[in-house]
Image: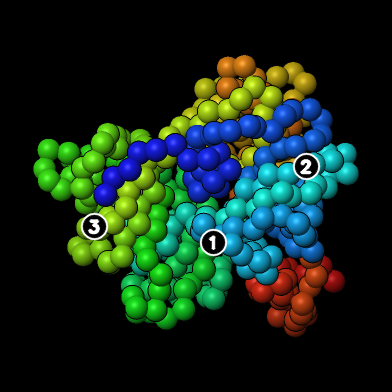
Amino acid sequence: MLHRYPVSFTEALLATLILFCTTQGSMASGGSGGTGISSGTINGFGSIFVNGIEYDISKAKLTRNGQKSEESDFRLGEIVTIKGTVDHKKRTGVAASVIYENMLSGPVTALSDSNHVEVLGQTVVTNHSTILDQFSALNDLQVGQFVEVSGFHDANNNLVATRIMLLPGSSRSNNSNIEARLIVGNVNTESEPASLRAGKLTVVFRKSGHPPVAGDLIHVRASADPVNMQLHADELIIIDKPRFEKGTRLNIEGIITRFNSNRSFTVNGIEILIHDKTHVENLMGAILALNSQIEVEGVIDDKGVLIASKLEIEDDRTSSEFNGNIQKIDLKNKRIWIFDVKRVFDLVM
C-alpha cells in the first residue's frame, strides 16, 4: 500500500540520513550551546562519539529500526541521530534520544570491484573509512547474501557506505524483511499496480493517494525477494522534504548533492550558507564541490537555511578517527582490533 504522511523530525532525520525529511512539534533552540540535533557516523564508544562530540547516553531513549534497544546494540560506522544538550567548548553532550535506522537491507544483486557492490539494484560505494562487519573485503561477498548498509546518498544517487554488515545465513529465511530508502527515478502510474524505478530495481506498488514522483525519497518494505529485479512493496512511504523552525541548531554530516558556489550548496536536502565568519577546517586541501563529504554546524534562519558557524571538509584521503579501547594488537601483521571491528593500519614503529 502507499502512504504519504509527514513523520517526526527526529525519526525522519535519521531514517533518511538528512535526506528529504520533515518536522513536527517543538524544535531545538540555537546559540553557542544548549539543545540541538546531531546526525552523523558513530566513531567511538565509552558513551558515544558523533561528529566530534562525546555524548552521555546513560539516560537516553535508544531506538534501532523503530525498536527499543541497548547501548551495546550500536556499532561503529552506523549513522545515528541524537537529540540532546551540548557543551561546544568541551565537545561533550547529554543525549535525550539516539535513533538508528538502516538505509538499505537486502540481497547482494551484483559484484563489481573492490570499492563497489550492488545491493537490491542500488550501487553501494565504499571508501577508506567504511566499516565491513562479518567480512573483510567486498569480493568476499556472494550474490544473494543479505547485507545491511548505513550510509549517505550522493548526487548520483549512489549510496556511500559508512558500514556494511553481512547478515547471518545466506538463505532468505534467515534474514529480516527487505527494507530500503530509495531515490525515485521514473514512475509509471498508468497501470495497476503502479511501478517505479530506483537504480536497477523496479518497485511495484498499489496506488493510494498521491503517488511518488521522480526525485522523491521513499521508504520501502517487502517480505518477498525481488524476482528479475522486480520488488513487490508491502509498504511504501514518501518522506517529505525538511522544514525547520528558526533557531534550530543542527550538527550534520553528509554529502553535497547540489552545488551553487563555495558559499551556497545543499547537503542531502538541507540548504547551507557559508559566510565570512564561518570557521572552515580543510586539513587535506580537499576541494569543496558536488559530492564532497562534509560536517557542518549551524543554526536555521527565518528562510529555513542553515547558516554555518563551522564547516569541516572531509576527503577520501583523510585519516579515519575512532575513539575507544584497543582490544588486540598484531604488530607482525600490522593489525589492530577496536571494539568488534578489525581495522588494518600501517603502524609507525
State the residue at coordinates (36%, 45%): 237
Quadrant housing residue 303: top right
State the residue at coordinates (36%, 63%): 178
Name the mark nearer the viewer: 2 or 3: 2
Q: Position of residue 17 (x, y in %)?
A: 53, 45
Local SS, label 1: strand
- Amino acid under disc 3: His
Task: Look at the picture and state if 341 lies above or below 293.
Answer: below
Dot 1 crowding, Cα within 10 Å, few <14, some 14–19, many 20+: few
Q: Nearer the viewer, residue 131 or 16?
A: 16
Quadrant location of the C terminus? Answer: bottom right
State the residue at coordinates (66%, 66%): 70
Q: Which residue is mark 2?
A: 85
Name the mark nearer the viewer: 3 or 1: 1
Residue, far front: 25
Q: Are marks 2 and 3 in contact (CB under 8 Å)?
A: no
For the residues labelled 2 and 3, the Cα–Cα distance comes to 42 Å
Q: Which residue is mark 1?
A: 67
- Amino acid under disc 1: Gln
Local SS, label 2: strand
Q: Are marks 3 and 1 in contact (CB under 8 Å)?
A: no
Q: How many marks?
A: 3
Q: Nearer the viewer, residue 36 or 307?
A: 36
The label number, if any, that marks residue 150 in the structure image: none
